[in-house]
Every structure is written in C-alpha cells, then in structure tokens.
Amino acid sequence: MTVLLTISSLIVHFAVLAQGTSNDSKDWQKAFKKADAFVSQLNLTEKIGMITGTLSLATSGCIGNILPVERLDFQGLCLLDGPQAMNRADLVSIFPSGLTAAATWDKDLIYQRGKALGEEFRGKGGHVLLGPVAGPLGRHALGGRNWEGFSPDPYLTGRAMEGTIQGIQSVGVQACAKHYIGNEQETQRSNSFASDGTEIDAISSNIDDRTLHELYLWPFADSVKAGVASFMCSYNRVNQTYACENEVILKDILRDELGFQGYVMSDWFATHSGAKSINAGLDLNMPGVIDASSFITGASYWGANITKYLADGTVSQKRIDDMIQKIMAPYYLLGQDSADFPSVDPSLLFTLAATSGFSLPNVGIPSRDVQGNHAILIRQMASEGTVLLKNTNSALPLKSPKSIGVFGNDVADPTDGLTYGDAYEIGTIDIGGGSGTGRHVYLVSPLEAVRTQARKTGARLQYIIHNEILAANNFVGLYPTPEVCLVFLGTFASEGWDRTEYEADWNSTLVVENVAKRCPNTIVITHSAGLNTLPWADNENVTAIIAAHLPGQESGNSIVDILWGNVNPSAKLPYSIPVNETDYDIPIVNLTDAEVTSPDAWQADFTEGQFIDYRHLDANDIDPRYEFGFGLSYTTFKLQSQLKVEKVVKQLTARPTKTKVSTPGGNAKLWETVLKVRSKVTNTGSIAGATVPQLYVSFPQSGTPVGTPLQVLRGFEKVFLEPGESEDVVFELQRRDVSFWDVKSQDWVIPKGSFGFRVGFSSRDIKSTKNVTLRS
Ligand SMILES: *[C@@H]1O[C@H](CO)[C@@H](O)[C@H](O)[C@H]1NC(C)=O
Ligand SMILES: *[C@@H]1O[C@H](CO)[C@@H](O)[C@H](O)[C@H]1NC(C)=O
Ligand SMILES: *[C@@H]1O[C@H](CO)[C@@H](O)[C@H](O)[C@H]1NC(C)=O
Ligand SMILES: *[C@@H]1O[C@H](CO)[C@@H](O)[C@H](O)[C@H]1NC(C)=O
Ligand SMILES: *[C@@H]1O[C@H](CO)[C@@H](O)[C@H](O)[C@H]1NC(C)=O
Ligand SMILES: *[C@@H]1O[C@H](CO)[C@@H](O)[C@H](O)[C@H]1NC(C)=O
Ligand SMILES: *[C@@H]1O[C@H](CO)[C@@H](O)[C@H](O)[C@H]1NC(C)=O
Ligand SMILES: *[C@@H]1O[C@H](CO)[C@@H](O)[C@H](O)[C@H]1NC(C)=O
Ligand SMILES: *[C@@H]1O[C@H](CO)[C@@H](O)[C@H](O)[C@H]1NC(C)=O
C-alpha cells in the first residue's frame, strides 16, 4: 500500500542551536544511558506505543508519530517527509532536489542545504526528517525516485549523504538514511493483490555480496559513519525476503558490520510480519496503528499484538527494551529533550488535509514561516548545479540580445496549481512528485525571470508555450525570428511509478527540431527528474544545451543567472548521458498479468554486478554523448600534468586490523587515511569560475576477482579560482577506497598489483595518471 499524501506549512526564524552531529561512540554511550533510564520507567502499553507508530490524521499533521508519554514529560516524536522540502506543509522552501545537489559536486553547499532543510524541520517541530536518499542509487536511468537521491556513483552519493546528514543533524534534527536497500525500481516495489485476491509479493532485488558492498551499501556505510540517527528499510524484498524482515541486511550488515547505533523504521506499510520483523532487527513500525478517523486504512502487525508475542515467547522483553533504547538514543544525542525544541506546528494538520483532499474545517491557524533567507542558498545552489553540456562558438553567456524567443511547456507557470501531483502539460518542473514533493509558497518560472531580464535590457520577448503547437510545426505566432531561441523541456517523475521514455516529455524532439529549423541560435534547457537522451544534440542550429534538472523554487532566477553569465557554470553530470538508450539500458522488470504465474514472480537479478553507468560504458568501450563528471564553463582550466601519490601508511596490510565495531561506521581502521594524491589546478581563462578536479582509481585487474570496474571515482574537490589563479588539490584516500570486498574472508582487502591514480575534469577527460603498488 502506498501513501502519497501531500502537505505543507511554517515559523519565524529560530536561533540555530549548534547541537552538533555525532558519530562519536562516547556521545552515543551517554545518550544510551539516558535512553535506558527512560525505558525503565515505561509500562507495557507505553512500550508498545514507542515501537509502533500511530497515525491519527484527525489530531496530528505529522506523517509518522510516536505518541507522547505525558507522565514522563516525553512529548512524542513527529516524523515528516522529505528530502528536498518539508512535504504537505505551508510556508516552507522548495530546495534543489538531490540530483541537482549532486550536480554541484560541492560538499559545502550540500552541507548548507542539509542544514537549511534541518532548520525548517526544527522550526515546525519536526524531530525526524525522512531523508536523505541513497536507495535508489540509480541502477535504472528511468527509476521514478532517482531525483530524490544523488547519483548512480556510490562515492559521490556517499559524500552527499554525509554532508546532508551532518547538515540536518547540526541543528538537532534527526536524519533518516533511506530506502535500505535495493529499492531500485518503483514498479511492483510493494506487494499487490491479483484479481482473484492472491497476494503477489514485491519485487525481489537479488544482489550478490560484493556488488552490495561496493555499490549499493557504500553510501549507506558513509551515512552510518556520519552519525545518522535512523534508517528506513525499503518496500522491496532482498534475496526473496522483505527488506524490513531481512536479518542479513538489518542485523549482520547494518549492526554487526557497520556498527549502526540508531533505529531502523519501516517504510510506510513495508512491515509484513510481527515477531519475524521484530526479531530480524526492525525497531519501529510505521505508520503503525491507524486511527479510525484517518482517511487511509491499513493493518499493523505490531501494536496490541505484541502482548501476544511476549506472552507466547516469540518476542522477548529484552528485545522490546532494546528497540526503545535505539529509538530514544538519537533523541537525547541531538538534544531533542531540551525545553527549547519547538512544538509541532498545529497548522500541519490543515495543510496535510488540504494536500490530501480530506475535509477539515479551516480554522485559520496561521502557519509558522520557516523559510528564513533560504531562497538565497536555493538560487545559488541551483545555478551551481546547472550543467552546461554544449556551447558552440560561445553562444553563452548571452550578449544582450535585443530579440529573444522562449518556447516549450516547461517555461511557463504551472497551470494546475503549485502542488505537483502528476505529470501535467503546461508548467515548469522544479521538483518531482510523491512523498518527496512539496507545497510551493512561490515558484519563479523561467518565463517570469526571462521576461524580467528582457525588460531590464530593453529586449523584445516572444513566446510559444504549447508543445502541441510546436510539435505540429505551427509558428504563425512568431515574427521576426529572434536572435536567440530558448527551448525549455520538462521531464517529470514521481514516487510510485517509473519513467518509460528516455527523451524529455511531450514530443520534445519535434519541439527542438521545429524551433531549430527556423532559429540558427537555439539553446535547449532541460528540467528533468533524471537522464534524457538528446537525439538533437548534433543539430547544427542547437548552439547550447543545459541540463538544469530539478532546481527548486528559484528556478527561473537560477537559469537567468547562467544564461546571462551572472554565474559561471561549474556543475558536472552526476551520471552519463548515452548516445542511444540501448547503450545503457538495464530494463525495469515489468511483468504483465499473464506473466505473474506465482506470488514470487517478480525477480530482479542484478547480474550486471557493479557495471552500471560509467562502469558499464567503460567496460564495453561505449562512447557516451556526455560522460559522467562532464560539464563546461565560461572559462578554461588546466591541471598539472604530474601527480604526487604519497603513502601516509607505509606498510599496508591486506586487511584492516580488527577493532570493535561499536563505533558508527564499523571497523575504524577502514576509515583511516592511507594515501594522499596531490595535483594543482589553474584558471587559464579570463573570468572567475569554479571547476571540479576528480580522482579516479583503477584497481589492478590481476589482483582482484572478476567484476572489477576499470575505474571508480574516489575523490573530488570543487575549486573556485580567479583568472590566472592556481590551487593545490589534495585527495585523501581511506583504506576502504583502495580495497575490494572479499566475499570469502568477508572483509575489505587491498589487492596486490599496480593501482592507477587518474586525475581529470571528467571520467573521460583524464589529465594526469600515476601508477603505484600499495602491497607487494
Ligand atoms: C565522524 O565523521 C567525520 C566525517 O565522516 C570524520 O571526519 C570523523 O573522524 C568521525 N569521527 C569519529 C569519532 O568517527
Ligand atoms: C501505563 O501508563 C499509562 C499512562 O501513561 C496508563 O494509561 C496505562 O493504563 C498504563 N498501562 C499499564 C499496563 O499499566
Ligand atoms: C543474496 O544472495 C547472493 C547470492 O547467493 C549472496 O551473494 C548475497 O550475500 C545475498 N545477500 C543477502 C543480503 O542475503
Ligand atoms: C495484529 O496483526 C494482524 C495481522 O496479523 C493485524 O491485522 C492486526 O491489525 C494487528 N493488530 C493490531 C492491534 O495491530
Ligand atoms: C509497466 O507496464 C504497465 C502496464 O503495461 C505500464 O503502464 C507501465 O508504464 C510500465 N512501466 C514501465 C516502467 O515500463
Ligand atoms: C506529439 O505530436 C503528435 C503529432 O503532432 C501528436 O499527435 C501527439 O499527441 C503529441 N504527443 C504529445 C505527448 O504531445
Ligand atoms: C538551421 O538554420 C538555417 C537557417 O535558419 C536553416 O536553413 C537550416 O535548415 C537549419 N538547420 C536545421 C537542421 O534545422
Ligand atoms: C539506437 O539503437 C537501436 C539498436 O541499435 C537502433 O535501432 C536505433 O535506431 C538507435 N537510435 C538512435 C536514436 O540512434
Ligand atoms: C596502471 O595500473 C592500471 C590498473 O592496474 C593498469 O591497468 C595499467 O596498465 C597500469 N599502467 C602502467 C603504465 O603500469
């Protein structure tokens, strides 16, 4: 069952408390002591309430709740979506989506975004922010939720998870690393019922151990290391067992190997058993018991049933206490027991109702405004996450054109309202749909911003918005031909379904070709929830191409900043764009009713192993149209041709020494810096700008098992430089970065043989390499 409610709301800015995120085991130990003391005072009814959520949409606007225990002065926990905006709330900001954040390749901005999101959640009284997302990672280019996460590269996603979690938790709000794990497609992500009532199980993601560790688990390990408070297990099955009752992923890997200290909650209605899920390591059932007054229904296997499990001995009292300790430790760790933690904004109830279409009298409770000055960060981050892919004859930045044309349905204000439910024809796309969406207070469309700019510079502006008119080649409304034609294309995606087309939506290719036929200076901008193939990229009249992804509420201003050169583009693709979709595709499993001959029919075998995105293109020697890590600037940069590789640890052993795993991140030795790679970057052009030197590591094929990618990203730094300025770049590599997961010994191993260290401006634009043997 799916809950796609939509809400929104707000507050005046509160002072930010520097609670500090923590992955320090001592802080966790202190928090656990307080949690122990709390648990010892609870009676059974209260205990059951602590581990089984309560959804009561008549009394709370939180999408997940742990009920208060008034007699112990515990006000309860309020859980709210989502990763790029507080969903179903009013007077909140719509931030750039994860995908746009990843395209900045800017660790500091990613942290600032997490912090600003955290401030808005705290301001509304939200204890838990249900994000960030590392699952889906992006196995499928067309995955419906890829835009909520960051990149199909685990290293880039890992850094983004780390920065986002630390930002959110720095203001005392709990982050939630989700959806754990293998949640790569939306199609049949949950169980369903056939017409004869037979229950059909969710898709099973069948992932081998090495691929799990080196690809899908990698950014989740970074999340644990960053001190994340909670995890959310996903809807799908992993190796035939539902993620939320899978002991291997919840216990053996998350607890015993990664040393995770917080709690695991289920995705909404992703719990499929009682004692089984409890004993497998699920700590919190969401949404839990649903109040009769709510407009959604669904059973919980927990709640009052737990009395029975305790009575018949299938669940122990000790396990229940352990679950509550894990739930309460982050609450104390982040200082949420403090008297100045804001109360839950009561208006959330009304914005939830408005968004979800159930009726509550509008009693006019003013929403708390929590937007602060976040619009500044949003505008800046979106322009710094806008990727310039093509720029022939310096078509950009624009040089004060006196006649401008804008075209396409993505340029205009949304015509169906400012809350996105489903794909609609007219209106710019700045965020996707489902639980990860948000209620706009405002949205600056490209048309609005380009018109403002045109007025300022005395330029004439013509526009045709309907793609139907453009696709039909009907341009009677256009005279004369503008000096520059800006075509805006949109691609929508949402939780709950996967995309089916690689090209941008709504006849985009015909739209571009028809504009280009009459306009030799056609510039195409895409607002997209993911990868698009660009079949018109080589069109002689398409002079520039920009991938702006999902920029958030300042969309129009951010794109004008890039087009007119107020901001020099510095974003890089967080995935590869193939020439042809057949170069790339791992099909989403999509069975017809006739093919579903058993409840177990839905199986996704991850047989490609680690070979997704650039790893696949590299291994098969396929040239992409635009490669992973690629993006142009209005200036030029140079990397020093010599690399220095410095061994920090002189004698490297194959395996890390064993240490206690009670520290977040597991074996501390894995996180020890073992190497430093140094290079130098120079701005050789005439204007200031930023670039991203990237470090790729080639593992020795001879010293590793079959299935090792030719190169993997293991470092990046965003560097801003004035014209002529240079800066040293240092990439620090930790032991895990130069190890592969050895299935036999169940450990990370540094292989023998020659490693290649490769530094460049993209995965295909390597400027310097050096080979070093780490172990003989
Ligand atoms: C906490 O995480 C940060 C960032 O990953 C790291 O620099 C620091 O060493 C970690 N601290 C501990 C105690 O593990
Ligand atoms: C537990 O305490 C609550 C008050 O928080 C009370 O309403 C309830 O009846 C008690 N339950 C038991 C089993 O003692
Ligand atoms: C899933 O099955 C594969 C193949 O047997 C195995 O390598 C892997 O460890 C299993 N993973 C989990 C989480 O059970
Ligand atoms: C007990 O579990 C059953 C499913 O086995 C479920 O239908 C029921 O709602 C649960 N009861 C409570 C109080 O959660
Ligand atoms: C799966 O099949 C259904 C029914 O034919 C279709 O509506 C849906 O778009 C398909 N999804 C994908 C991702 O191909
Ligand atoms: C695409 O264009 C064709 C031809 O004009 C039209 O029939 C079709 O409805 C258009 N499709 C969309 C999605 O606009
Ligand atoms: C490019 O523009 C020129 C001049 O407007 C036109 O003659 C030509 O056909 C166009 N090319 C394409 C591929 O549309
Ligand atoms: C993509 O490749 C397929 C199979 O080789 C081919 O049929 C198709 O025409 C190609 N499409 C494009 C846009 O090149
Ligand atoms: C450098 O190491 C890589 C990875 O092992 C290997 O493929 C390459 O041949 C090596 N190059 C040289 C010059 O040794």
Image (tube, grey):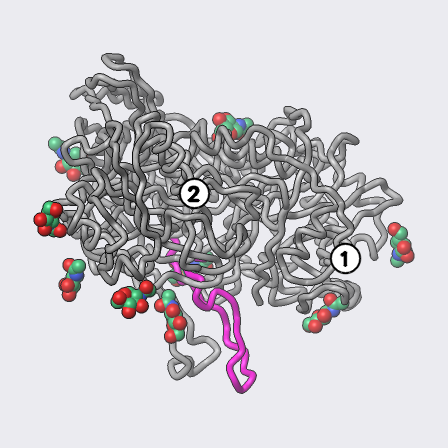
Q: Is residue 754 above or below residue 299?
A: above
Question: Which contiguous range is marked in magenta?
Answer: 183-209
Q: Residue furthest bottom?
A: 196
The foreground one among 583 and 314 is: 583
Residue at the spot 52% in from the left edge and 74% down from the top edge: 192
Q: Position of residue 553 (x, y in %)?
A: 48, 40
Is mark 2 in CB contact (under 8 Å) with mark 1? Answer: no
> Where's residue 277, x and y in %?
62, 61
Q: Secondary structure at mark 1?
A: loop
**Residue 564 position (above or below residue 350):** above
* Amino acid type shown at disc 1: Pro
Instruction: Report which quarter residue 150 is drawn in.
Output: top left
Q: Nearer the viewer, residue 231 or 463?
A: 463
Specify which label sits upstream in the sequence, 2 or 1: 1
Residue 757 seen from this side: no
Residue 207 painted magenta: yes
User: Element type at marker 2?
Assistant: loop
**Main secondary structure of the magenta stretch:** loop
Identify the residue at image location x=38%, y=78%: 592
10 Å neighbourhood of mark 2: few (<14), some, or many (≥20)? many
Q: Quadrant of ligand 3?
A: bottom left
**Going by the image, does 344 lie left or right of 652?**
right
Q: Is residue 111 left or right of residue 569?
A: right
Quadrant of the snapshot with the N terminus? bottom right
Q: Is residue 360 magenta?
A: no
Q: Residues within 10 Å of mark 1 (few under 14, many from 20)?
A: few
Distance between the Cα atoms at labels 2 and 1? Answer: 32 Å
The mark found on residue 445 in the picture is 2
Locate the C terminus by quadrant. Answer: top left
Q: Which mark is residue 361?
A: 1
Amino acid beneath label 2? Ser
Residue at 66% across / 48% down in the picture? 79
